[in-house]
Image: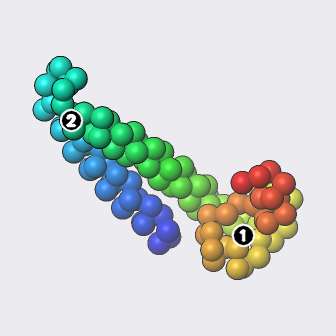
Amino acid sequence: MRARDEAQARLVRTDERIEGLRRERADEPADDEHDPDGPTLSSEWTMARAQREVVESAISEIDAALERVAAGDYGRCTRCGRQIPAARLEARPAASLCLDCAASVGS
Ligand SMILES: [Zn+2]
C-alpha cells in the first residue's frame, strides 16, 4: 500500500533526524548552562520524538488496515460492521471506523 511506504519513509527520515540530534547532544559539553544552543536542541529533540510517535501510530494503523485487507474485512467498520464510504477510505485509507462510529468515539 502506497500510504504505508510513505509512512515508512517518514519513519526513516524521523529516525535519521533523531540520530543526528543524538550525536549533536553527545558533542555538547557536560556543563551546557552557558550553551545558547542547549534549549533549542532539546526542544528539537522533543519535537522529533513526538513526530516519531505520530508516524509510528500511523504505521500501526496502516498495518491493521492491511490485516483487514488480508482477512477480507477491509472497508468495513470494525465497530458497527457497516461499509465505510469510499470517499472516506480515499481520504483515510487506514480508517477502521465509519464516520458515525468515528464521531461517537471521538477520533
Ligand atoms: Zn461504524
From where the camera sits, is residue 48 visible?
Answer: yes
**Point 70% across, 74% down: residue:** 88
The residue sitting at the top extreme is 31
Q: Left or right? Give the position of 13 relative to 56.
A: left
**Point 77% across, 58% down: residue:** 102
Quadrant for residue 101, please give it: bottom right
Q: Left or right? Give the position of 98 relative to 74.
A: right
Q: Where does the image place residue 4, in percent across and percent down from the top left?
A: 48, 64
Quadrant for residue 37, please give it: top left
Q: Where does the image place residue 15, in percent across and percent down from the top left?
A: 32, 48
Nearer to the camera, 8 or 10? 10
Q: In the rendered view, tell whether residue 6 sits above or below residue 16.
A: below
**Which of disc 2 and disc 1 is earlier in sequence?**
2
Mark 1 to mark 2: distance in Å? 51 Å
Kind of residue indicated by mark 1? Gly
Residue named by callout 2: 36
- Mark 1 vs mark 2: give the one in front: 2
In which quadrant will I find the C terminus? bottom right
Q: Where does the image place residue 81, in percent across and percent down from the top left?
A: 84, 62
Kind of residue indicated by mark 2? Pro
Residue named by callout 1: 75
From where the camera sits, is residue 22 visible?
Answer: no
Nearer to the camera, 40 or 56? 40
Q: Left or right? Give the position of 20 relative to 59.
A: left
